[in-house]
């Protein structure tokens, strides 16, 4: 991989990781509801789960969809249903209970890592990274570079979203405001489904 190609890839990785999408919207909601410390497993699940996804897609999983295109349609339906369920969970989460405790729990590391496989933005990012930036002449080395570099760029980007959610929490001092924020995040998550359906 040339230096120019690597720099172009890093720019792509940054822009695609920092822009809004299902992961970042959910991380912002988690940061607002649970704080940064309790959101750490969610953040690392996104970052490491996505990094693993790139490696596996690059090792040939994408070829399975070419052989069995119906699997792509099935994955799309599963993604839409799962994201609608997540939006419902965010919108209906009880912000606080007596004594300031919450009955909701943040997404776990494994849940966040598994979510990458039904996240349309993650699939788009992974396939674009591999097809556009892994040189066919040096596939193995290029795939290792793309996988590791994407992981290194992605984790700080998702951390920014969780941190922003924590900052927003300062302005959400009442259960009513936090409920309105959760509903807004849920609506944004549903809106992020539009490109899949459209």
Image: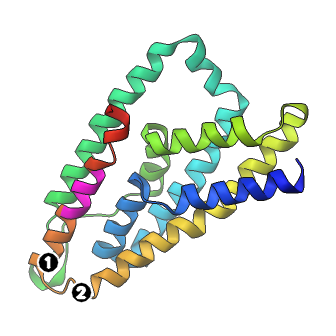
* Helix, strand or loop status at disc 2: loop
For the residues labelled 1 and 2, say whether their Cβ atoms are less than 8 Å apart: yes
Q: Is residue 95 visible?
A: no
Q: Is residue 188 magenta?
A: yes
Q: Position of residue 58 (x, y in %)?
A: 70, 34
Residue under the image location 18 percent in, 67 percent down: 103
Q: Quadrant of residue 48?
A: bottom right
Highlighted range, magenta: 184-189
Q: Quadrant of residue 59?
A: top right
Farthest residue toward the top?
67
* Helix, strand or loop status at disc 1: helix
Residue under the image location 71 percent in, 39 percent down: 132
Residue under the image location 80 percent in, 46 percent down: 144
Q: Which residue is mark 1?
A: 177
Q: Quadrant of residue 57?
A: top right
Mark carried by residue 171: 2
Q: Position of residue 122 (x, y in %)?
A: 51, 44
């Amino acid at each position: 991989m040339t230096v120019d190609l690597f720099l172009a890839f890093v720019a792509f990785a940054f822009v695609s990781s920092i822009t809004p999408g299902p992961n970042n919207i959910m991380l912002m909601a988690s940061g607002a509801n649970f704080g940064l410390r309790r959101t750490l497993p969610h953040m690392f699940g996104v970052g490491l789960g996505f990094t693993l996804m790139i490696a596996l897609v690059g090792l040939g999983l994408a070829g399975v969809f070419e052989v069995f295109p119906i699997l792509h349609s099935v994955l799309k339906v599963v993604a839409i249903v799962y994201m609608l369920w997540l939006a419902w969970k965010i919108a209906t989460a009880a912000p606080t209970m007596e004594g300031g405790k919450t009955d909701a729990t943040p997404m776990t590391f494994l849940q966040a890592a598994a979510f990458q496989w039904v996240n349309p933005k993650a699939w788009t990012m992974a396939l674009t990274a591999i097809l556009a930036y892994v040189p066919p002449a040096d596939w193995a080395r290029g795939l290792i570079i793309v996988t590791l570099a994407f992981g290194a760029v992605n984790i700080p980007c998702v951390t920014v979203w969780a941190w922003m959610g924590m900052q927003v929490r300062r302005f959400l001092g009442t259960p009513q405001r936090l409920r309105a924020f959760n509903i807004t995040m849920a609506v944004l998550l549903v809106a992020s489904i539009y490109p899949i359906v459209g």
